[in-house]
Image (cartoon, rainbow, N blue to C red):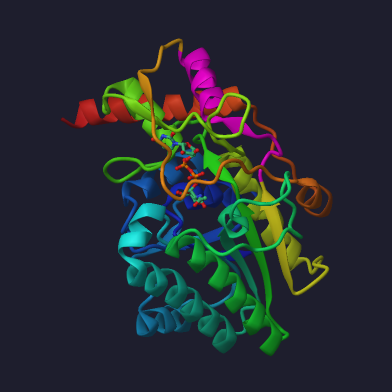
Amino acid sequence: MKILVTGGTGFIGSHTVVELQAIGSEVIIVDNLSNSNIAVLDNIEKISGIRPGFEQFDLADQALTANFFERNHGISGIIHFAAYKAVGESVDKPLHYYRNNLVSLMNILDGMLTHGITNVVFSSSCTVYGQPDELPVSEQSPIKPAFSPYGNTKQIAEEILHDTLHAYPQLRAIALRYFNPIGAHPSALIGELPLGIPNNLVPFITQTAIGKRQQLRVFGNDYNTPDGTAIRDYIHVVDLAKAHVVAINRMINQNMKKPLEMFNLGTGTGLSVLDVIKSFEKVSGQKLNYVIVDRRPGDVEKVWADTSFANNELGWKAKSTTDEMMLSAWNWEKALAVNEKSNS
Ligand code: UD1
């Protein structure tokens, strides 16, 4: 089966490409490389032995996207990762985010309708729940007003899917609501490649430990949580990637219960920022230089997933432990440092 993976050179996309190749799928990647690197293709090939197809263009460009679909036949399904994802940047550049994240989705849906492609998996986020009233958060929890334009693009994208599927009953979509993806492939050949200063916790931890950053700032220790730091549900990117393979198979094998399904993808366990730091210190054997500072505006206090629906319906479960996730992230950071040294 041939699968189009948009954003396939990115963090979650690259891991998903490898998992798709492992089950024998033919993968074609479309990516504009705005937040990723062409060398990822070489590393995917080193892992799987197969070089995925690749085209570099912007899916927000309607003509280029239409032209891509005209030239590429036999696509069984699409996994749509390509999007901007920095919460803070989205507050400063809202139009950038709305245009990129929403227009690309609409162009893809147009392409699907024109060329009879019926299946799409969409990258959504637990951000759609805001600060949930009840924890763990299930798929039935209400969607809360978005905290940021980025979060709003995920909510609106889900609505676009809902309305489009209503109008065109031949279409199928699965929206996967990710909690906090971390870690890297066990080969340490692919992983997260933040541009500039990382926004997210785990790359900031590993970059501090390797000496690229001076000190990690822990944003707030006055939350209503056992150690006062904010709680998230961190999930290994390889576990997350595997869920995409399950989702695309579910669509192609016509096992869906409804045309549009939503699933929470997390481990079901909440970890505080200090829990994550402790695990990192344990697996790396290194003390981390960190300081407690004020809360980061826009952060929710605590969120973790009720995973029962995904576990039961998809027959999928996140397997990795916190220590395994942190060790893989650390091995990736060390591999990057070795590469940078040999390139300099
Ligand atoms: C955010 C988004 C999420 C999005 C993800 C992708 C929200 C509520 N969440 O996740 O939807 O998919 O970004 O980028 O909008 N922290 C520190 N110091 C740091 C960095 C982070 O203490 O230097 C803390 C944060 O305050 C938070 C936790 O670590 O408590 C995780 O932060 P982060 O990795 O940025 O992810 P989220 O904000 O949870």
Q: Quick check: 318 left or right of 130?
A: right
* Magenta region, residue range: 266-284
Foreground residue among 2 and 112? 112
Q: Quick check: 324 left or right of 261?
A: left
Judge whether 93 appears above or below 342 on screen. Answer: below
- The x and y percentages for residue 8 are 46, 56
Extreme-left residue of the structure: 344
Residue depicted at x 44% and y 25%: 330
Residue 111 on the magenta span:
no
Foreground residue among 186 and 157? 157
Judge whether 205 appears above or below 173 on screen. Answer: above
Residue depicted at x 73% and y 58%: 141
Instruction: Place residue 324 in its image quadrant.
Output: top right
Instruction: Place residue 30 in its image quadrant.
Output: bottom left
Q: Is residue 110 visible to us here?
A: yes
Image quadrant containing the N terminus: bottom right
Q: Is residue 335 visible to us here?
A: no
Residue 277 on the magenta span:
yes
- The x and y percentages for residue 152 are 50, 66
Q: Quick check: 75 left or right of 166?
A: left
Number of numbered labels in the structure image? 0
Instruction: Place residue 157 in its image quadrant.
Output: bottom right
- The x and y percentages for residue 62 are 39, 83
Image quadrant containing the C terminus: top left
Judge whether 20 appears above or below 234 on screen. Answer: below
Q: Main secondary structure of the magenta part?
A: helix
- The x and y percentages for residue 34 are 31, 59
Residue depicted at x 71% and y 54%: 246
